[in-house]
Structure formats: C-alpha cells, structure tokens
Image (spheres, rainbow, N blue to C red):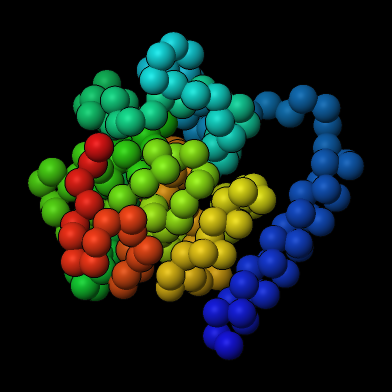
Amino acid sequence: GEMRLVRTVRALANARRHAKANAAAATAVPAPALRPAAKAAAKAAAKMSGGGAGSVSRRYFLGGMLKGTVVPLHGSREKQPPSSPEEVVSFSVVDRKGESFEVQGKIGDNLLYLFHHLQDSSPNLYLEGACEASLACSTCHVILDQDTYDKLEYPVEEEDDMLDQAACLTSTSRLGCQIILSKELEGMTVTLPPFSKNFYVDGHIPQPH
C-alpha cells in the first residue's frame, strides 16, 4: 500500500546517498576541515556534557555533527539560555493541528529535548521520546522540509528500523532525538505528524520526564 511505497522510496533515497557519500569519500582529501557550524555545534555539546553522569556517547548526525560526540541527555542543555545571539537557531514548527509556530533553540540543542522545553509554554509542541534517545522507539518522529532533510547525513540503520514503525511516515521523516541544531538549520520547518504511536494511552498528552 501507500506506506510500503514510502518505505521503498526512503530505502532507494538512502541507497543513493550511501553511494554518493562513498564516492565522495574515495576522492576526499584526508582529514578535511570541519565546517564552522558543525565545529561550533560539536564544541558546544561537548562543553555542556563533559562526558560525565547523565551523558552518553552516541551517533548524532544532523547539521554535520561529529560522529561519537558526547551529547547531554534529559534536556539539561536545552534549558540553558544561549550565551550569545550568534548561538540562536530560529525555525518553524507546524503542530499536529496545522498551526505554525516560530521557535528558537541554540547550537548544540537536541531537537527532542528542545521540544520538551518548549512544551512548557506551548503545550501543542509535544514529543514523547519514550526511549530517552536510545533509538528504541519512534515516539519522537518528526517530518522535515526537503531542503533540511537533504542537508543531513543519512540515518543510521537503527533509526531507519524505528522509523519503519512510525505512524504517518514520509520520505523526509526523521527521529527528533537524532537532530542536533546548528546554524545550517536556521529557517528549517519541522512538522509534527497528525498522530504518533505514543506509549501513553490515547488522548493523553505526554509530559517530559
């Protein structure tokens, strides 16, 4: 049916991106310099986490993020204000009813935990994140605009496996927990699917935990 077609399109698109990346790697100059936005995002996330308790070393990819960067979980970073205007990343969110919001995060923020923080003032902007960013569920499924999706590294296999279980899957779907803000994502549009497979009972709005 329609969902099978979407999954096929996603698989073909990811295969092309793998092939393109492999071809680029074969001709790349060794140890290329990081793009400034990616370098700043990696530095900011590492500074906040310190590699201590409450942090894990995970593979976050968005915006050129360094693989294996230590990123703080549970929203501690996202509650902190930006240290300067240059850190601010502004973008649009379309909620499950189709209403558009202009929101702000900062370089290095995890999109899932930023939504948890935004939910305090805008209850419609909710994502559950039941597995706490461990790639074991699809409850933080979001839909990106095509330009933003094309900027990202392709999702790892574990993320694709979870997206296969997501409701309202599209060709530009990603998991919010795998998205780290950078200046490259300024002006993006993030759309919440009309409904999702939350672990809570139907009709309950999940609260950050």
Residue occupying image coordinates x 37% and y 63%: 197
In the rendered structure, the answer to whether residue 113 lies left or right of residue 10 reads left
Q: Quadrant of residue 190?
A: bottom left
Q: Is residue 177 above or below residue 175?
A: above
The answer to whether residue 21 is visible is yes
Residue 209 picture location, percent across and down: 25, 37
Residue drawn at x 24%, y 73% as measured from the top left: 98
- Residue 128 x %, y %: 31, 50
Q: Residue furthest bottom?
A: 1
State the image quarter where residue 97 is shown.
Answer: bottom left
> Where 30 sits versus 154, above or below?
above
Q: Locate the N terminus by quadrant.
A: bottom right
Q: Kindly identify the residue that appears in the image at 24 percent across and 61 percent down.
A: 201
- The one nearer the camera, 136 or 52, is 136
Give coordinates of residue 159: x percent, y percent.
57, 51
164 lies above or below 154: below
Q: Is residue 125 left or right of residue 36?
A: left
Can you give x and y, in whole percent of width and height, for residue 186 in the image?
38, 47
